[in-house]
Image: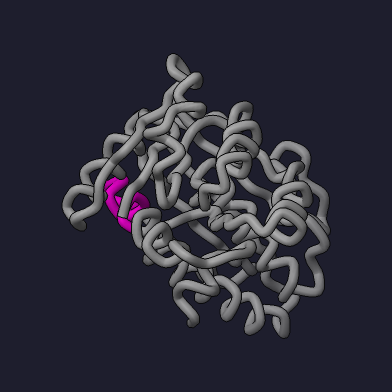
């Protein structure tokens, strides 16, 4: 499979390694200094583009992929105000787009556990719920897309919570999210339920970025020759 990489930071380099390990070919690498290459024959020859850039540049990168009719695996978070535009392109323009707030298999198992625990805890209103997420200092959005997904899944299943907010802005009906940016931490997310008598928590701690890179490449393999707006529920089916 011919793959274009958009964004060539630490994740881009890790994805490149996994792409090669899995026997695919990198035909184009586009970063902030060579965006002119979106018009190159090499980019337009790609079967799939994998995009890990910045929230500010993501939507324009997706538009350029759509213009070339190249399926996209989107790894950037913090751009979701443009989600309706992307979904419309997939329907009206017959484009292909795969989005996940986190590409790690372990995190997606964690998502399922989080929803299951929230359904159980809905029956026990004495427990308040909060969240802490820790990422490296280079991450631009806070809370992370993973934290938002976790919080929204709790809201769907826990009647006493109506929304999420950053800890300093928290209301009683909100899930408080405490965001920490330090060092080179790939990602830690913890959900905590507290009562006067005990605490229940679940936690996911990413050891390296390779799990995210592998998930993105597997997603690229999955969407080749498909159409529409796709996600981890389509890929993993659990």
Tell me: 167 left or right of 159: left
Whole-percent x and y of residue 190? 49, 57
Image quadrant of residue 141? top right
Residue 212 drawn in magenta: yes
Question: Which residue in the rendered view is the most extreme toward the front?
Answer: 41
**Quadrant the N terminus occupies:** bottom left
Q: Can you see residue 76?
A: yes
> Would residue 35 be counted in the magenta stretch?
no
Magenta residues (range): 206-214
> Is 32 left or right of 97, judged from the image as shown?
left
Residue 167 x/y as whole percent: 68, 42
Image quadrant assignment for residue 60: top right
- Left or right of 19: which side holds 72? right
Which coloring applies here? one colour
Which residue is farthest top?
Answer: 33
* Residue 202: image location, x then y, percent: 47, 67
Residue 138: image location, x then y, percent: 45, 26
Residue for point 78% across, 64% down: 161
* For residue 218, above or below residue 132: below
- Residue at point 72% right, 52% down? 89
Question: As rendered, which of 105 and 56 lies closer to the eye?
Answer: 56
* Foreground pick, 91 / 179: 91
Q: Nearer the viewer, residue 180 or 128?
A: 180
Q: Confirm whether residue 137 shows in the render.
A: no
Residue at x 59%, y 66% (from the top left corner): 193
213, above or below 6, in the image: below
């Amino acid at each position: 499979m011919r793959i274009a990489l958009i964004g060539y930071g630490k994740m881009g380099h890790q994805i490149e390694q996994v792409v090669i390990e899995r026997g695919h070919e990198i035909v184009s690498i586009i970063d902030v200094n060579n965006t002119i290459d979106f018009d190159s024959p090499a980019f337009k020859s790609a079967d799939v583009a994998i995009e890990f850039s910045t929230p500010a540049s993501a939507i324009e990168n997706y538009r350029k992929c759509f213009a070339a009719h190249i399926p996209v695996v989107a790894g950037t978070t913090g751009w979701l105000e443009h989600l309706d535009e992307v979904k419309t392109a997939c329907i009206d323009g017959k484009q292909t787009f795969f989005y996940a707030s986190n590409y790690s298999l372990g995190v997606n198992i964690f998502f399922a556990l989080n929803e299951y625990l929230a359904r159980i805890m809905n029956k026990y209103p004495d427990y308040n719920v909060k969240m802490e997420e820790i990422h490296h200092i280079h991450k631009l959005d806070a809370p992370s897309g993973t934290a938002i997904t976790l919080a929204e899944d709790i809201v769907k299943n826990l009647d006493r919570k109506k929304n999420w907010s950053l800890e300093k802005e928290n209301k009683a009906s909100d899930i408080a999210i405490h965001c920490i940016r330090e060092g080179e931490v790939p990602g830690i997310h913890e959900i905590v339920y507290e009562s006067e008598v005990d605490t229940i928590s679940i936690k996911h701690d990413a050891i390296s970025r390779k799990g995210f890179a592998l998930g993105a490449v597997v997603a690229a393999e999955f969407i080749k020759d498909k159409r529409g707006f796709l996600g981890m529920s389509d890929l993993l089916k659990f």
